[in-house]
Image (cartoon, coloured by chain):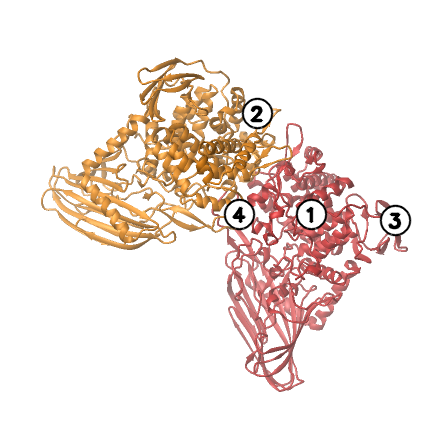
Chain colours: A orange, B red
């Protein structure tokens, strides 16, 4: 938990008023800047102290061998790990021979502000050196949304009381020491790699330095460059130096009180698996030249314009809880940062904010992040799915290796190859394939983007449908069974007929058939025959949906409800997360749920359950669900809201929204939880907004918890911008942009046009007792934070 | 397959008439000598060429860290690997400056003989050096059954035509290079460790050398010593030298044709985890002194006497197949070598014949090896079970770590700690605990050894019963379920209610209750209450036994028969063993059986199945069983024989018996398969002899296959020696030693006394079609060998 009196509740800013070195690593994640291509952790300009230094380029990784204690057929032989690339954020400062280091002397004033509308990190420090010299240092940092290779820093220093001699060293450093990382038995942490960059070239010219490095094993090549603009009183002495792993521009000057040294640092990055050193150097040099040409003020203005356009169709407003208001915008901003300019690259679980999970992307992206991007920045969602399409050759080869048809996408990866060393929780979790298909269906449904459907969507649907057809089989009663797979609940594995998997596979098979009929020519080019279509439909219709007649609830998987319940009563609070305190053996064989599985199925395939089934299922599974995964809250909130448990839904919303700002999982240091942050948006839009898109019309069933007086969100829908506003008793629908559209409110269709907002009353919520969570696993309460 | 024209069929000898270096490693395993404490591979005296040099001490291991790609709670942090200890077998020879090396010059004559009655490996070589010098070299080697620390070699060399100057170097070498081992992706191979012995001391005196070494990580300490007796014409010059890793006694002499240099080498080994260097040195020195005192001839005589006594109550004779006759005795001899003098140490899967499976012991010992030892050398069986008892503290701690009660024994181990790095096929295979209990029940039933039951057996039964009680739970219909475990079939894992596990657990619970009531005082000292007894009985009575009503067969585990059948038709012969060509994911979720599981349950708990069920089950599972484990054949033979498939049973017998002599699994180089060799004995005694001991009487239902004219086996039973002889139409029971006893023949009880053999007619076998195996997995046929 981040426990300093920072972060006053401001609607558009995260502001830190006090520097607590104990949570420095966490704040580096929170204050990270990224554009989906380049990410810089919020490290202090002077580099030290640091929790975890980090600069990342999307998909720039090193390979590491995966050596198994007991090898097995089809185990991946190497994994990928995101690496800390050349650090260009560094600006060291010497004040009268004393290095500016907040651990020494006295930090009189400290403020860091992440401005969500400006897209900028601002810092202000007033520091008294051990020798008593007082200086004011400020910096503004941005990673450009409009020029994806570019980051820029405006840095200023001035003495406050007495004249001072200052030396500013602006650096570009490769293979920096990753101090403070220790090997851990926590599988969620990344495996840190040190000094993996081989220097290939370095150059300096005037105030610019360029460097080329290569990752030894993956062979990926990286160029980084910096250039500077200096504004100072006369007398500054500037020297530039480039060595293989370190470039430096030093500015030395004597300043009187009131005089300032202002430095603008432009940074450019580029990487490639194929391009030559010279081509890469040219590329970053061109980017740098363009950035210099735009200038600092120009970059700031472009950034603002880009964000204004984003917020114009993505903002969520809520009255009644300022902290959650702030947190939801913080989440939206970080998701934008993770996906904005990925450009056919993955969106990792931590975005580009830290090395957690080795920088891998998971199913989280399709299931939690893309729903948000699909509604707010559709091109980013399309781009993430095109990345999947680009990795189809690898996924087809993997399917073949696994003796399956179609494509089998990896559980965790950077480059498309499976990178997991524990197959029961990865290879066996085939639902990732249906999740990708689900994201395609959702994207096409929300955008009407036919070109995407033809070029990308259909191929993904067809190859995953083929996978499902080969994964399942018809038993003697002609039921279509999918045996021995792992669903979203990672505390169960290798189960028969996991209900989430089966329902998502069913949708995948059906959607592939529908899309193939819609685009017969493209389908034919993919080798789809009418027989194949029929097979998909037959399998989908015969899909096993396990149900316990005696209990009257669905089974998460066959036989699940016959298993022993976890001994929650004897599990102390410090026994969580269970995976760190109990063997998989016990977790898998008992009724205990890490994260929503059946409940997620009720969200994503809600049309397959009656309202009564949803309520009964939720009441049964809620006391078994420990939420040891941060992916839980959004889904819990959605179904809690749907079954009328609005108080509980609100609690889950709060937990999701504050996950990183309060460091509830104690691992924000490794990066923010992109999917969990998306979960807060899902809790609001699909939960209290009741948005579903199962059929032809986009449906809303808004219903507010007592804690909120108003919830208003915007979203893009088939070329339009909609705004939905929920009040305690009524909902108001407005069309901000685009042609009239049919929507539905609590099951009743209506047409919305730009001329007239539509107001509808909200029917009362169903009532029932609040389901209990396992003891000690109740959702987080802000008052209980201690 | 071992494909040289060696091994003529001789009833009491394995004789090799031609040296084929391509199968040198395999013959080193076949010709290994051991006594359960010390094992020497059949390496050539001169050390090179070697397939795999090997000298082993039971339980002398090095630790190796187990580093996981994705760590998990409760994963063992280090494993144990048997190591090649100080090599004392080495006797190098120089003939006129040319080293005796069969790869050079010409090997005119070669013969190696393993004498199963003498317990000796004899070698004869006539060699012409590249320079044309002809010599005759012979050696006899034994590892003493009567003096367990001792091995001895009688070595002779003589020139044949011309005088020769010979130098014999008798060596003691630590950390010898293990050439020829390559890292493999085959999980069945051991992980070779090189140069792990740290030299602590070395001494020489006259013709003796002593050395002390320590394994770096495990800290185990080892002393090895050699002494010599030389008999030669006058003029021999003898020098002795000791260095930290090499000791040497050199004898130089000029020999005329007809003159011989005769050398007797005595070797002594000792190790300890606790004793000091001096104590260890004294211990081996004392053993060496005693051996010298006994002398070579004395050791040979003791060896013969020991083996005469063994064969007197253990021999199996069969008429009709000389090769199988030879092979069965070969197997008995190797099992004796593995278990004779283990003395409360484990019996590893490869005995002490090679580094396969890292030298670990598995459930194989209790389920396949101990039945044989219980009937032929009961103290060795008791000793192996006392080893389990000695490791109870570790097994209790493991149970606690796994959140279970009682004791949880390891899947693979040397020192009692779990040493497996893949939990679904190890930790989850809890049946090992019931297998240990089964071995206790069998041992007590066959020997009537009450002292053992009180001191050792009851504690093992109680602690394993406690485990089962905590592993299972009562479902809403009050069935006792054991969910998420792995049975003997390693191509299924983490299944609910594995029938083998449940039936063996049931017996375990019942046996613990019965034994506790028989010895109430001891039971009380183990904390057993009447409530606990009642719980065990209730659980046993309510045990789930899955049955498919529609198919009319038992299910190997719940839902097993609903799974897709493996696509055998499209699996080519080179696709086996499946584990090297298919992912676990596919194996686990389909109907394909690596090794008998339900069929083994029908053997060990035969009283729980009707004759009709056995026949139906066998017919259903046989076409699914690929026998990728060498443990399969014995069990297959037993049930095939019981259901009347005598031809098929004979084929399985042949496969089991010849497994190592024909290298059918292509890994005899790593050591012989002790449990599979025991399987051949089981095929004969429990299969064609029909021996069962489910109730109070020992029962036989002999029935010969057409390939055999007579089968006669001896065994020890409650202080008696019985001999059972099966002929095509009748069986003859003789009591060779001991008091009259009640037995049963094909269900009819009779009393056998020493005065009068009993002859009974054999009823005709039930008939039915021969079940098919998966294509390409039919049992091995000798004619088809190519």
Check if mark 1 and mark 4 are on a common chain.
Answer: yes
Local SS, label 1: helix
Disc 2 target residue: A553
Q: Chain of mark 1?
A: B
Disc 4 target residue: B76
The quarter of the displayed image where residue B401 is located: top right
Q: Is residue A419 visible?
A: no
**Dots 4, 3 in contact, CB < 8 A:** no
Mark 3 or mark 1, which is nearer to you?
3
Instruction: Work out how far the residue at label 3 is from the one at label 1, CA to CA, in angstroms.
Output: 31 Å
User: Measured from the top left, where is residue A295 in percent x and y?
Assistant: 18, 39
Check if mark 4 and mark 3 are on a common chain.
Answer: yes
**Dots 1, 2 in contact, CB < 8 A:** no
**Dots 1, 4 in contact, CB < 8 A:** no
User: Measured from the top left, where is residue B772 in percent x and y?
Assistant: 70, 48
Disc 1 target residue: B456
The quarter of the displayed image where residue A715 is located: top left
**Dots 2, 3 in contact, CB < 8 A:** no
Does A348 appear above or below B301? above
Instruction: Work out how far the residue at label 1 is from the one at label 2, CA to CA, in angstroms.
Output: 48 Å
Instruction: Work out how far the residue at label 4 is from the one at label 3, CA to CA, in angstroms.
Output: 52 Å
Q: Indicate which disc, 4 or 3, sits on the residue closer to the N terminus.
A: 4
Q: Indicate which disc, 1 or 4, sits on the residue closer to the N terminus.
A: 4
């Amino acid at each position: 938990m981040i426990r300093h009196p920072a972060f006053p509740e401001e609607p558009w800013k995260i502001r830190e008023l006090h520097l607590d070195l104990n949570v420095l690593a966490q704040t580096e994640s929170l204050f990270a800047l990224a554009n989906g291509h380049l990410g810089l952790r919020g490290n202090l300009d002077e580099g030290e102290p640091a929790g975890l230094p980090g600069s990342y380029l999307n998909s720039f990784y090193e390979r590491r061998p995966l050596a198994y204690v007991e090898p097995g057929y089809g185990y991946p032989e190497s994994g990928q790990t995101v690496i800390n690339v050349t650090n260009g954020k560094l600006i060291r400062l010497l004040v009268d021979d004393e290095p500016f280091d907040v651990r020494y002397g006295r930090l009189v004033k400290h403020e860091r502000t992440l401005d969500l509308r400006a897209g900028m990190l601002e810092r202000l420090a007033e520091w008294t050196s051990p020798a008593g010299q007082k200086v004011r240092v400020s910096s503004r940092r941005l990673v450009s949304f409009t020029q994806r290779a570019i980051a820029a820093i405006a840095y200023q220093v001035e003495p406050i009381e007495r004249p001072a001699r200052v030396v500013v060293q602006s650096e570009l450093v490769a293979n920096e020491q990753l101090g403070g990382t220790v090997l851990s038995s926590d599988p969620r942490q990344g495996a840190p790699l040190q000094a993996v960059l081989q220097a290939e070239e370095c150059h300096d010219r005037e105030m610019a330095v360029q460097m080329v490095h290569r990752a030894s094993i993956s062979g990926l090549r990286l160029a980084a460059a910096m250039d500077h603009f200096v504004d100072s009183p006369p007398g500054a002495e500037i020297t530039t130096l480039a060595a293989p792993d370190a470039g430096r521009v030093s500015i030395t000057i004597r300043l009187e009180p009131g005089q300032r040294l202002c430095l603008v640092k432009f940074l450019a990055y580029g990487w490639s698996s194929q391009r030559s050193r010279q081509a890469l150097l040219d590329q970053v040099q061109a980017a740098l030249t363009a950035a210099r040409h735009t200038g600092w003020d120009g970059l700031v203005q472009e950034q603002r314009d880009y964000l204004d356009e984003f917020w114009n169709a993505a903002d969520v407003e809520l009255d009644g809880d300022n902290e959650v208001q702030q947190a939801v915008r913080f989440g939206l901003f970080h998701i934008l940062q993770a996906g904005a300019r990925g450009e056919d690259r993955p969106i990792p679980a931590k975005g580009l904010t830290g090395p957690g999970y080795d920088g891998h992307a998971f199913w989280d992206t399709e299931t939690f992040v893309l729903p948000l991007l699909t509604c707010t920045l559709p091109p980013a969602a399309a781009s993430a799915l095109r990345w999947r399409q680009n990795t189809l050759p690898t996924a087809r080869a993997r399917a073949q290796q696994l003796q399956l048809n179609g494509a089998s996408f990896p559980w965790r990866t950077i480059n498309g190859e499976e990178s997991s060393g524990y197959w029961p929780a990865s290879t066996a979790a085939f639902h990732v394939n249906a999740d990708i298909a689900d994201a395609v269906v959702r994207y096409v449904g929300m955008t009407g983007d036919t070109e995407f459907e033809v070029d990308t969507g259909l191929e993904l649907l067809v190859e995953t449908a083929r996978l499902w057809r080969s994964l399942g089989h018809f038993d003697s009663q002609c039921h279509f069974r999918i045996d021995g797979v792992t669903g979203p609940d990672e505390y169960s594995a290798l189960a028969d007929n996991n209900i989430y998997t089966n329902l998502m596979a069913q949708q995948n098979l059906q959607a592939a058939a529908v899309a193939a009929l819609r685009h017969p020519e493209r389908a034919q080019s993919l080798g789809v025959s009418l027989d194949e279509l029929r097979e998909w439909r037959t399998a989908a219709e015969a899909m096993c949906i396990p149900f316990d007649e005696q209990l009257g609830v669905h089974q998460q998987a066959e036989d699940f409800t016959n298993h022993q319940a976890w001994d929650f009563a004897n599990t102390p609070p410090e026994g969580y997360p269970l995976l760190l305190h109990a063997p998989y053996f016990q977790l898998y064989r008992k009724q205990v749920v890490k994260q929503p599985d059946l409940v997620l199925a009720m969200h994503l395939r809600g049309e397959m359950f009656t309202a009564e089934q949803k309520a009964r299922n939720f009441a049964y599974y809620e006391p078994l669900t420990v939420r040891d995964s941060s992916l839980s809250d959004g889904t819990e909130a959605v179904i809690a809201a749907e079954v009328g448990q609005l108080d509980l839904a609100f609690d889950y919303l709060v937990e999701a929204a504050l996950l990183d700002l309060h460091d509830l999982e104690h691992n924000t240091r490794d990066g923010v939880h992109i999917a969990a942050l998306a979960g807060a948006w899902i809790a609001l839009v699909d939960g209290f907004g009741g948005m579903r898109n199962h059929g032809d019309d986009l449906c809303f069933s808004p219903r507010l918890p007592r804690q909120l007086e108003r919830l208003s969100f915007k979203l893009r829908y088939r070329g339009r911008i909609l705004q939905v506003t929920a009040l305690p008793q009524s909902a108001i629908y407005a069309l901000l942009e685009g042609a009239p559209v049919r929507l539905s409110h609590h099951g009743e269709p209506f047409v919305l046009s730009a001329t007239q907002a539509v107001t509808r009353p909200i029917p009362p919520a169903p009532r029932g007792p609040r389901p209990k969570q396992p003891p000690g696993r109740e959702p987080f309460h802000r008052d209980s934070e201690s």
